[in-house]
Amino acid sequence: MSSIQPYPFTAIVGQERMKRALILNAISNSIGGVLIRGERGTAKSTAARALAALLPEIEVVADCPFACDPSGIDTLCDNCRDRLAAGETLPTTRRRTRFVDLPVSATEDRVVGTLDIERAIQQGERHFEAGVLAAANRGLLYVDEVNLLDDHVVDLLLDSAAMGVNVVEREGISFSHPARFILVGTMNPEEGDLRPQLLDRFALCVDMHGIVDPRQRVAIIERRVAYEQDPEGFYGEWLPREAQLSVEIGAARDRLPHVTHTQRDLFTIAQLTTSFRVDGHRADIVILKAARAHAAWAGWLAINEQDILLAAELTLPHRLKRQPFEEAAMDAGWLEERLRKARADAPPDLSPPPPGAEKTAPSAKKAPSR
């Protein structure tokens, strides 16, 4: 941890949609990351660093450079697998979640790591030099000015974020290690946009703007000045709220595997994406994952209409088809109207896809709004 405490996540004024997108990814890193677009000075990088600082501690293999999860046998790196196969007991420890910053100038080898081919040929040893993806495993990978990064490198990051594994192959030699991380990309649209193909692969997207409420702007000034004058003291004041949020994220992570959905929920999501003429099926899957994470965050065990609505707000705007010079904005009322229509059109009881299966989907637990 840095000697200077990061700015507290809970002290960020406003920007609720951005904070929600980050928290949902913290609860479920399988969602696939978030892209934060906004003008300069809107707390984009501050929020990413602050989130990493409050994430719960994790258990890791003590001497593994990839921070493997000792309880996840199927997600171990090749080194840890070999050690287990040899009968060794893996030592464990607990540590804070890492924050890894990817420089704009990063090359492919710097990101994925490299294999020492000469050593493999001469000594018969497989030696892997870890890259950024190794350092970021089970942590938060932050990419500032992602729109200025080489497209090929962005592809590599998004592939790893989606698959959860990094595989490096050179001259018939391969090495793989887990690469499960919270991917946070930020950019200023004034400096250029991402290609649509790359934009679509960011699971969630938030467009940020400067706050116009004078009272909130005053609060931003006061808090920032107080933090710069005494970072330790300011962080101490917000520590109870930071600790509470960390506990809530940990509880939501534990609750997530138990969150259920019905076939009717899936039909509602499919109807919603179809009504917006969204290409492909990535958006449908992301909405479901984000809705499940939001349900876990809210404290219930089955997704409902509100979970789907809030997930869609973060999933659809950057995937909408628009004409040149047309803003990709989405009115919340319009989205809610489409959602209600999709829910009304959904049959009350659907059979699952396998042919011949006659099984009733479980009913969702209806929970109050959070």
Image (cartoon, rainbow, N blue to C red):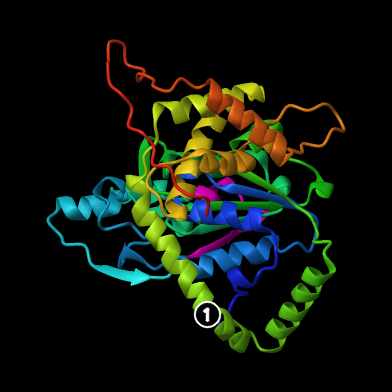
Q: Is residue 243 left or right of residue 323?
A: left
Q: Is residue 35 above or below residue 232?
A: above
46 or 73: nearer the eye?
Answer: 46
- Residue depicted at x 58% and y 44%: 310
| Snapshot quadrant of residue 211 | bottom right
Given residues 163 and 126, the one toward you in this image is 163
Picture quarter containing residue 91?
A: bottom left
Q: Which residue is mark 1?
A: 239
On the image, the x and y values in percent for residue 270 come to 53, 24
Label 1's element?
helix
Instruction: Estimate the x, y position of residue 320 in percent, counting from the top left.
Output: 70, 30
**How many circles with numbers are drawn on the protein?**
1
| Residue 125 at least partly seen | no
Is 227 placed above or below 187 here? below
Asked if the magenta segment contains residue 103, the reply would be: yes
Q: Amino acid at mark 1?
A: Leu
Residue 39 percent coordinates (x, y): 80, 55
Residues shaded magenta:
98-112
Q: Is residue 158 magenta?
A: no
Q: Residue furthest left?
A: 87
